[in-house]
Image: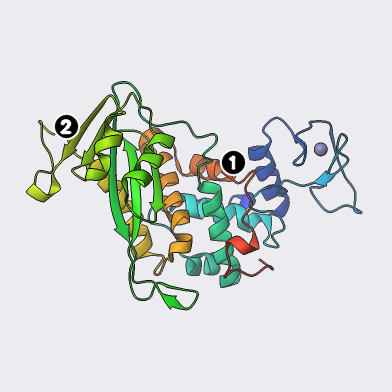
Amino acid sequence: MAVDLTNPIFHDENAARKHLESVRWPEGPVCAHCGSKRVTRMEGKSHRPGLIHCNDCEKPFTVTVNSVMERSKIPLAKWVLGFHLMAASKKGISSHQLHRMLGITYKSAWFLSMRIREAMGLDPETSSPIGGGNKVVESDETYVGGKKKNVHNGKPEPKKHAVVTLVERDGAVRAKHVPNVTAKNVKEHLSANVDKASYLMTDESKVYITVGKKFAGHMSVNHSQDEYVRLGGFVHVNTAESFHALVKRGMYGTFHAVSEHHLQRYIDEAAFKWNNRIAVGIDDTMRATNAIKGAEGKRLMYHQSRSAGSAC
Ligand SMILES: [Zn+2]
């Protein structure tokens, strides 16, 4: 893992705050409440460090307000290290590892990791569709979980959970947990995320027949007849299967039991790493910076992550 632990941003609160501010506000502080740039830093011992006053809405804020870090009692340097460790880890990092490496309670580490996954999630309102003219987008389904130890609210969850993955060849991925793989669910996911000018590649599942007609082209590979690759290697869903392997490796190798309630966050983490991979020129540091950028405007509330404590 290429994280330089001697960097002051990982152990000095002021350095960590400056780092978070420079990522969130590269051109200087912007009010976290109203977006105004007419702000004044509150210096002096009577104010908590990093406090800024907005001269328009008259409200105070810091770099953590209106972000996944808001109201957290975890020191900022530990947040910054948490972002870097999670962004640099290929297979994912467990809450137990974070607990040991950051020196915070297991419960705090679990909540921090869930908030960082939230930051890694794409904002559906600002993310652009994948694919386009002369581009190939693969769509494929997989099933994860389903082990007896997947217990949620005291009940075992023997059901396997479906994930539909859309991935542009040599491009970005959009993956989503759906209750069932139906024509309706697949169509919704495709319509929201894929440019209609794309060529669609799927397996032979009937759920794609109708929606496939909306694209520039639709070809399918018949897995049941051992026909994984046809037309000179053009028709396949191997890219989507590579992404599924990434999701499963993280979930089975590191995270142990993942309940359906939290599944999408783990998918989002894998998708974030795929979309910010070395092959597209993004190194560990840039990936961590992008995760911190994603922290803005998202808050993971107590009721959204029910097994976490409020004192994290
Ligand atoms: Zn304001």
Where does the image place residue 140, in percent across and percent down from the top left?
A: 27, 45
Image side of residue 277 versus residue 265, left or right: left
Single out the residue that lies furthest toward the bottom: 154
What residue sits 79% from the left and 46% below the top? Answer: 61
Q: Would residue 277 be visible to someone looking at this image?
A: no
Please tell me whether mark 1 or mark 2 is closer to you in this view.
Answer: 2
Circle 2 sits on which residue?
Answer: 234
From the viewer's perspective, tell me whether residue 44 is left or right of residue 131: right
In the picture of the structure, the residue carrying the numbered disc 1 is 293
Mark 2 neighbour class, 10 Å CA radius: few under 14, some 14 to 19, many 20 or more: few
Q: Amino acid at mark 2?
A: Phe
Query: In the rendering, at what x and y percent does residue 16 appear?
Result: 67, 49
Quarter containing ligand 1?
top right
| Res 170 → quadrant | top left
Q: What residue sits 63% from the left and 50% below the top?
A: 9
What residue is at 39 percent from the left and 46 percent from the top? 175
